Image (spheres, grey):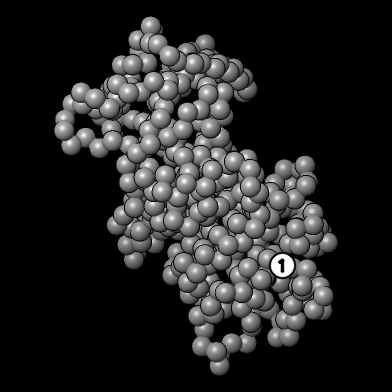
Amino acid sequence: MAATQAKLGILDHFSALQDPRQAWKVIYPLPEIMLLILAATMASAEDFVEIEEWGEEQLDFLRTFLPYENGIPSHDALNDLVNALDPEMFKACFTSWVDTLRDADPEIIAIDGKTSRRTHNRARGREPLHLVSAWAARQRLVLGQQAIDEKSNEIKAIPLLLDRLMLRGALVTIDAMGTQVEIAQKIIDREGDYCLALKANRPVLHADVERFFADPDAAKIATHSTTDGDHGRIEERRHVVCHDIDWLFSNRRYADEPAFPGLAMIGMVESKVERGGKLAHERRYYLCSTRLDAVTFARAVRAHWGVENRLHWVLDVVFHDDLARLRTGHGPQNMAIVKHIGLNLMHSTKATASLKVRRKKAAWNTGYLADILRGAA
């Protein structure tokens, strides 16, 4: 038993998680409950009723890792515990574990928000859970998440998330909501670089950059073009970068305009999309704290939008996040972390099948599920 348990190293990383229950009332140890919830979720269980049923069916499998002397707790007990767990401590344990999965190579970290639509409680005035997540594009790992307070927004949540991440040597990409001087400074202070989308919420700077790239004779620029086509759509993208930006720091429109720390480059992506005989044209602008060449800039921008189909889409379609109906306590936040753990474990396997197939296989084959949990699949 002990030798088998020792191979399940993921449990060690969550050993600091404090049990919110009164010690004399504890019948089912916290590690057993957390393993049950994680394993069942990876094996396609969608709620606590299904988690309880899965645990009853797979009790022998679970006992290969932990004793489960008192069997499986009820779905109500599972719900109560997950609602009561401290999400800040859970996130800290998650971040500590993820750091052991990351390698030392440079990474593009995309910061983006997602709403779990069914987690609202209108009767109690509770808005749906909105999380800001950090996604390591190259390794395809969720690095961390931060819930947005109902009376706040992403601008307040992003710095809290950045504080928990290892950013040294990383390029952090954020959409226009996060294009704030304070956020840029936070990234620089943590030894990372930024690539921030620039829109009309920075009107003066946006207008200057827009005029610059509108000039066909603009000097000292480099370009890279790509063409993609699928589902009856053809998209051409031209990526333009300029490292000569001294003109941005003089003759400003107003004296108190904030300057972005470490700004080293501006970039533009011009896209032309043809679909059904119609042509759509768009230009998007970016601020960067490092001098990327046009090819690397294109890769960074593309990697950021990859968070939509490699994280958010997977959570909705594979883990059915949009159907989750947890609406009380810390349950929505904590189950989001459980799904992120499961997603990271599945991404860390060497399997070539889709994540949807891997989750199905984990439900059908406990040997395969055990290998994923051990990091040996």
> Could you tell whether 245 is left or right of 61 in the image?
left
Name the image quarter holding residue 45.
Answer: bottom right
Q: Quadrant of the C terminus?
A: bottom right
Residue lying furthest left in this view?
255
> Could you tell whether 222 is left or right of 58 in the image?
left
Q: Which residue is at the front of the view, 229 or 375?
A: 375
Q: Is residue 320 above or below residue 1?
A: above
Residue at (43, 32) in percent of width and height: 288
Q: Label 1 belongs to which residue?
A: 9
Q: Position of residue 141 (x, y in %)?
A: 61, 49
Q: Which residue is at the front of the view, 234 or 48?
A: 234
Q: Amino acid at mark 1?
A: Gly
Q: Is residue 300 above or below residue 327?
A: above
Residue at (50, 54) in percent of width and height: 165
Helix, strand or loop status at disc 1: loop
> Could you tell whether 113 is left or right of 314 in the image?
left
